[in-house]
Image: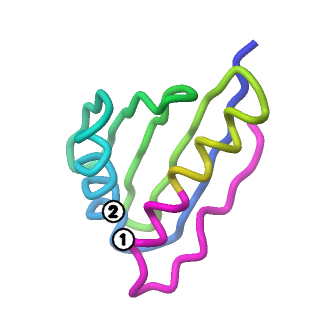
């Protein structure tokens, strides 16, 4: 059974971070994106990204807890680097 979790990072720069994440991921994995939405084939499962005027939202999926943890780590680790000016500590994750 596929498990999912959704993370939210409140920022007025959501579109910029979505595009940075997807462009970076594109070097290693299959990615499809525009300025408001994206999909990335992470090693543990798909990540779906959405940008609004107020927040970046990412939903990750995996077959098990370790896969979800890995997907969350990948997203958080990269987002922290891109959003360092906002002192990003990672996304606020919740189980779906």
The vertical placement of 80 against 56, above or below, is: below
What colour scheme does the image use? Answer: rainbow
**Label placed on residue 17:** 2
Q: Where is residue 85 drawn, in percent x and y?
A: 39, 87
User: On the image, which quarter does residue 26 sit in?
Assistant: top left
Magenta part of the chain = 76-96
SS of the residue under disc 1: helix
Q: Nearer the viewer, mark 1 or mark 2?
A: 1
Residue placed at 63% from the left, 42% from the top? 70
Q: Which residue is pictured at 53% across the width and 77% down the height? A: 88
**Residue drawn where x is 33% and y is 62% of the image:** 17
Residue 30 in the image, given as x and y percentages of width and height: 29, 27
Residue that mark 1 sits on? 82
- Residue 87 among those drawn in magenta: yes
In space, the residues marked 1 and 2 are separated at their CA atoms by 7 Å
Where residue 52 sits in the image (x, y, percent)?
A: 39, 57
Q: Is residue 6 left or right of residue 20?
A: right
- Quarter of the image with the C terminus in it: top right
Secondary structure type for disc 2: helix
Given contact means CB atoms under 8 Å apart, are the residues at marks 1 and 2 in contact?
yes
- Relative to 34, is 44 on the left or the right? right
């Amino acid at each position: 059974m596929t498990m999912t979790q959704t993370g939210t990072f409140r920022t007025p720069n959501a579109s910029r971070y979505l595009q940075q994440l997807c462009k970076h991921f594109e070097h290693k994995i299959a990615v499809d994106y525009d300025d408001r939405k994206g999909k990335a084939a992470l090693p543990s499962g798909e990540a779906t990204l959405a940008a609004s005027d107020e927040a970046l939202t990412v939903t990750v999926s995996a077959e098990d807890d370790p896969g979800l943890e890995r997907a969350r780590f990948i997203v958080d680790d990269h987002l922290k680097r891109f959003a360092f000016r906002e002192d990003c500590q990672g996304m606020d994750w919740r189980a779906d």
